[in-house]
């Protein structure tokens, strides 16, 4: 076995074992034929035009797989893991779960971006008091960039051919801008905070999930349902500042005390509410919706990681006043609730996935049916 | 009314792989070369793409294993188009030919008219 063949076989280990059993020898043959072609090809083969230099062939056989081939095998591994039409049942469930998580995350970010942009417009025209706009400040550049979430969401739902590519590109721009902006904002000589790095990593994860899960075999998305969700979510979220104003209770004359809603992140409330509804419905109806368990479980973990990265900055320092201790307690409460929800959702997902056939099970049953 | 099964959707690589197998069985590397020829060098299938497509087409029953041979000490499998594969390829080829004919007819009509479809707008301030 040449070093190249050895490296190809190592690379192919990223593919599921049932898939490798069926295709590995074929794939190695094609990969090696590209490195050592040109002898008299048998019928069905394809001869190259020029006779190669034998030294070149030896170099290639001792070398490394070309990056393009490595990329295509890795992309295949992601497509197989996050299956679409015609994929084995368990891979399809994982694919559906990740696609659902991506759509829900993009929906949430799109809603926040639209409400923020709307609030800024009203504020600029004097139609909204500064306090109700939720901390409006800064220029227009950053919120305008935030609208890329909304554009990416709509394009993903519109489900054009190769739907994942343009949203992936848009979100990559967002990631790059985020990295540049937060690097510039850090004073010279200071390291970038762990929270910022975690934010970059999470955004990179979302970009990877969009690119990996929305491939050519991904089933079409229900356009109407998701656009209705965008409208409803934006309307609900736009009402949040009004609810904050209504629940705002001054602590003392002349000073504003925090309301409970000030300390609750709306996305955490929505996520915990959705997790509770999903678990109650699953228990009540007895049905199995593993894609929802995976999607909500992933989003809860995402939010938990974000909060965990922010915890060091939110810890009350000695001598903290009542308000600071309340903030820290509320954050700790939300982190605990998220951790419990993550555990509950993933244990439910594990139980549901155990009932879904694997690729090997599906092949065995197909073999039995065929005789 | 007889039930007609829906026509499977074909991506461009899947269409080209079926077309590469239309005249004779081929092995993986042979398919790569044939697809490159059919697309005039525009589509160069990488291994990940090729075996993603082959796996899906085999699962859908559009191609099947024809035979196995040993070549340079390695196992080489040849694939052939099935009857269903030929029907699907035929349907998609006819659809593409129809689209190409329609586009050509419109281009011919445009050439005969000799003028663009939309008249240019008069410049502002001119009568």
Image: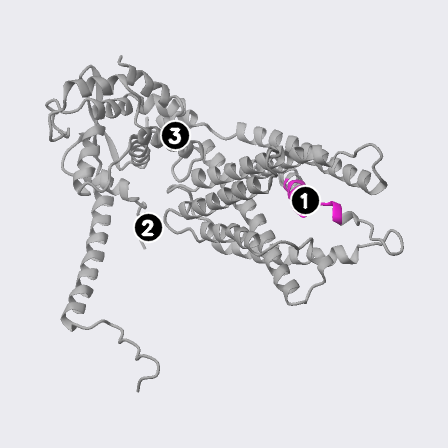
* Circles 2 and 1: CB atoms closer than 8 Å: no
Q: Is residue B27 visible?
A: no
Q: Outermost residue toward the top?
A: A1
Find residue A147 and name its label: none
* Viewer-nearest residue: B88 or A91: A91
- Same chain, marks 2 and 1? no
Which of pointers 3 and 1 indicates the residue nearer the eye? Answer: 3
Indicate left or right for A256 with A208 as reference: right
Q: Is residue B105 visible?
A: yes
Q: Secondary structure at mark 1?
A: helix
Q: Work out which quarter of the rendered image holds the C terminus of chain B and state it.
A: bottom left
Which of pointers 2 and 1 indicates the residue nearer the eye? Answer: 1
Q: Work out which quarter of the rendered image holds the N terminus of chain B and state it.
A: bottom left
* Residue ID at (47%, 51%): A157
Q: Position of residue A137 (x, y in %)?
A: 65, 54
Question: How much space separates mark 2 and mark 1, taking CA atoms?
Answer: 44 Å
Q: Position of residue A250 (x, y in %)?
A: 85, 54
Question: How much space separates mark 3 and mark 1, taking CA atoms?
Answer: 36 Å
The residue wearing badge 1 is A273
* Viewer-nearest residue: A145 or A342: A145
Q: Position of residue B10 (x, y in %)?
A: 30, 44
Magenta run includes residue A273? yes
* Residue ID at (43%, 25%): A361
Q: Position of residue B83 (x, y in %)?
A: 21, 39
* Viewer-nearest residue: B26 or A123: A123
Give the number of callouts. Answer: 3
Would you call the spot at circle 1 few (<14 residues within 10 Å), some (14-19), or many (20 or more)?
A: few
Q: Which residues are magenta?
A: A262-278
The residue wearing badge 2 is B3
The residue wearing badge 3 is A74
């Amino acid at each position: 076995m040449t070093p190249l063949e050895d490296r190809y076989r190592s690379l192919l280990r990223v593919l599921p074992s049932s898939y490798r059993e069926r295709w590995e020898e074929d794939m190695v043959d094609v990969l090696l034929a590209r490195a050592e072609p040109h002898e008299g090809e048998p019928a069905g083969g394809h001869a190259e035009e020029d006779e190669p230099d034998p030294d070149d062939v030896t170099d290639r056989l001792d070398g490394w797989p070309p990056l393009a081939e490595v990329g295509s095998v890795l992309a295949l591994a992601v497509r197989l893991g996050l299956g679409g039409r015609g994929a084995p049942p368990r891979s399809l469930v994982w694919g559906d779960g990740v696609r659902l998580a991506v759509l829900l995350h993009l929906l949430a970010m799109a809603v926040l971006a639209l409400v923020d942009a709307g609030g800024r417009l009203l504020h600029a025209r004097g139609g909204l008091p500064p306090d109700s706009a939720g901390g409006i400040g800064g220029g227009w550049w950053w919120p305008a960039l935030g609208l890329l979430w909304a554009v990416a969401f709509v394009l993903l739902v519109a489900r054009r051919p190769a739907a994942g590519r343009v949203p992936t590109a848009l979100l990559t721009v967002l990631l790059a801008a985020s990295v540049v902006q937060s690097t510039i904002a850090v004073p010279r000589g200071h390291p970038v905070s762990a929270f910022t790095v975690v934010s970059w990593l999470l955004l990179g994860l979302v970009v990877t999930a969009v690119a990996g899960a929305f491939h050519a075999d991904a089933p079409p998305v229900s356009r109407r349902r998701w656009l209705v969700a965008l409208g409803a979510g934006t309307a609900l979220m736009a009402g949040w500042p009004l609810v904050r104003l209504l629940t705002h209770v001054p602590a003392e004359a002349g000073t504003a005390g925090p309301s409970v809603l000030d300390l609750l992140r709306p996305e955490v409330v929505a996520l915990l509410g959705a997790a509770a509804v999903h678990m109650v419905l699953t228990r009540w109806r007895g049905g199995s919706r593993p894609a929802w368990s995976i999607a909500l479980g992933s989003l809860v973990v995402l939010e938990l990681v974000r909060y965990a990265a922010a915890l060091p900055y939110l810890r009350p320092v000695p001598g903290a006043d009542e308000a600071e201790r309340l903030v820290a307690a509320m954050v700790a409460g939300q982190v605990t609730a998220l951790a419990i929800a993550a555990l509950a959702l993933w244990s439910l997902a594990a139980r549901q996935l155990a009932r879904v056939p694997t690729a090997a099970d599906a092949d065995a049953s197909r073999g039995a049916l065929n005789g | 009314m007889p039930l007609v099964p829906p026509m499977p959707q074909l991506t461009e690589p899947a269409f080209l792989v079926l077309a590469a197998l239309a005249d004779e069985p081929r092995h993986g590397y042979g398919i790569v070369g044939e697809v490159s020829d059919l697309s005039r060098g525009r589509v160069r299938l990488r291994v990940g793409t090729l075996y993603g497509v082959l796996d899906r087409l085999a699962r859908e029953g559009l191609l099947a294993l024809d035979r196995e041979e040993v070549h340079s000490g390695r196992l080489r499998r040849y694939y052939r188009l099935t009857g269903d594969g030929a029907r699907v390829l035929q349907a998609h080829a006819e659809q593409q030919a129809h689209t190409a004919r329609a586009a050509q007819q419109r281009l011919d009509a445009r050439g005969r008219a000799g003028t663009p479809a939309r008249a240019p707008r008069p410049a502002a301030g001119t009568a």
